[in-house]
Amino acid sequence: MTKRLRSSDNTALPVISNRSPEYQSEGDGPGVHSAQQWPVSKDAMSAARTFLQECASARQPTLLLPDKDADGLCSGLILYHTLCALGLPPQLLTVHFVAKGSNVHAPDERAQLASYQARYLVLVDQGSRPGPPIVDSEEAKVLIVDHHASDSFPANAQVLSAAGCEPVATSSTLAYLLCRPLVASADSASSELKERLEYLCVMGTMGDLGAGFKWEAPFPDMRVCMKRWTKKALAEAVSLLNAPRRTARYDVIAAWDALMHASSPRELVSSSAPLIKRLHAARDEVRREVERCTHTAPMFSGDGRVALIRISSTAQVHPLIATRWAATLKSARLEMVMCANDGYLPGEAKTNFACRIARCALTRGQTDDAREIDVMEMLKQYASHVLGLQSAMGEDFARGHRQASGGIVMTAHFERLWNAMKETEPEIREAGPSQKKRKAWPSQGNTLESWLRKT
């Protein structure tokens, strides 16, 4: 099955293919199977490479907007190095990170992006949504490189999205497969740069999929890279890179500068340079804040499917706490764990929240049901119980991935959402392990196991 995505100005975007049991990895050359190219279609990848080549050749002011986690930083740096290898002078390439709690669509951010007067903009791992052009300039050209679930995008943007093909590639893997042939053909590219793109791909992917991720097809073979740098060093580097964005200070630039200037993952984790010390200090701060907030007892929705942990912190620890509880909290009907933080943006009367699929839902033996859990859809279903609520919460509600979602909404709206969850009546489910249609939920019972374990 294929579908053609269109921007809001009805300009056709590259075709993205959906699921298929056989893959031909785009960028690896001919494969045994040609039923599907991965992680995107060949046409989409080719169009994105043409954009980067045109950008470098034009030698015009260029703006790069990576996300602030390890996947965003690593995929952003892959694109940064590629544009420079293709001939774009570094002084024409500016890197911008959105402000704490903001996004590229917010009015303040749009004003700042316009102030750069860039002719080319490359957004990496930022997530996508429908809306007006990223900047109001007829001359500006925009490329979005992403893997978050979305079938709508800003107007006038060229899109390279891996979200339509499973297994969904991380933004770092997508950027690596996009850029590897360009770097290989660039006269200025060194073997060190090619190796660097490999470990950036690995670290970014580990940041999203975990240190234990198996580099199996259709993902590129990274066994040599893993052996060279060791999983331990790579995982430590990822941990350090992810920490600054979570601090109250939101010190993303420290992570970017450290990644930019480190010659290897080993240097990133073992150097005593001031930048690296900032990463260690940030991680220590986040660990203390997680420990402070994680002991809050959960509350449960009326149907037993959602557990809520409430915290108040200026640090972005709500995703970590949701992940920790999702791994350890057990209940017969639990499907999603949500951590709500009403203190992340002081003075703005907003609640930031993160949702994760409960591990017990994936291991209770109902594998068919477990595969159908979609936390984005669950959030929207609960919001639909209150007339006008989803519209009132806006585009920052239920963003991200089907397995890991969340949002930033007014606290008053979040309380209406939670009230809808609390008031949801338990349903009756017919007996039988293969029964897919839920008809009833028995009264809930939960146990906790080792949830104080350190992350």
Image (cartoon, rainbow, N blue to C red):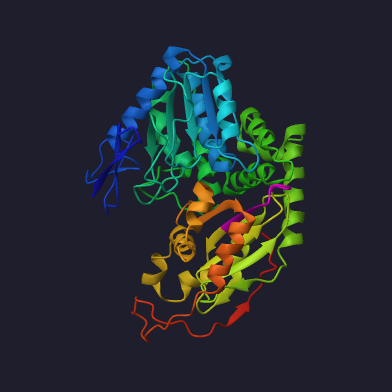
| Camera-nearest residue between 165 and 429 | 429
Residue at the image position 58 percent from the left and 70 percent from the top: 307
Q: Position of residue 183 (x, y in %)?
A: 43, 24
**Can you tell which quarter of the image residue 228 is in?**
top right
Image quadrant where one finds the C terminus: bottom right
Residue 36: quadrant of the picture = top left
At x 48%, y 28%, the residue is: 122
**Residue at far front of view:** 387
For residue 222, side relative to residue 315 (left or right): left
21, above or below 242, in the image: below
Question: Horizontal and vertical percent for residue 376?
Answer: 46, 57
Residue at left offset 76%, top offset 49%: 284
Q: Which residues are magenta?
A: 345-354
| Left or right side of 398 for 252 | right
Rendered location of residue 105, percent (x, y): 52, 37
**To which quarter of the image does residue 158 belong?**
top left
Is residue 179 visible in the rendered image? The answer is yes
Can residue 195 be seen in this snapshot?
Answer: no
378 or 261, which is in the foreground?
378
Q: Is residue 264 above or below residue 236?
A: above
Percent position (x, y) of residue 301?
Answer: 56, 73
Q: Nearer the viewer, residue 227 or 77?
A: 77
Please tell me which residue is depicted at 44% across the width and 49% down the height of the picture. Answer: 215
In-image side of 257 versus 85 (left or right): right
Given residues 423 and 401, the one toward you in this image is 423
Q: Is residue 451 above or below residue 232?
A: below
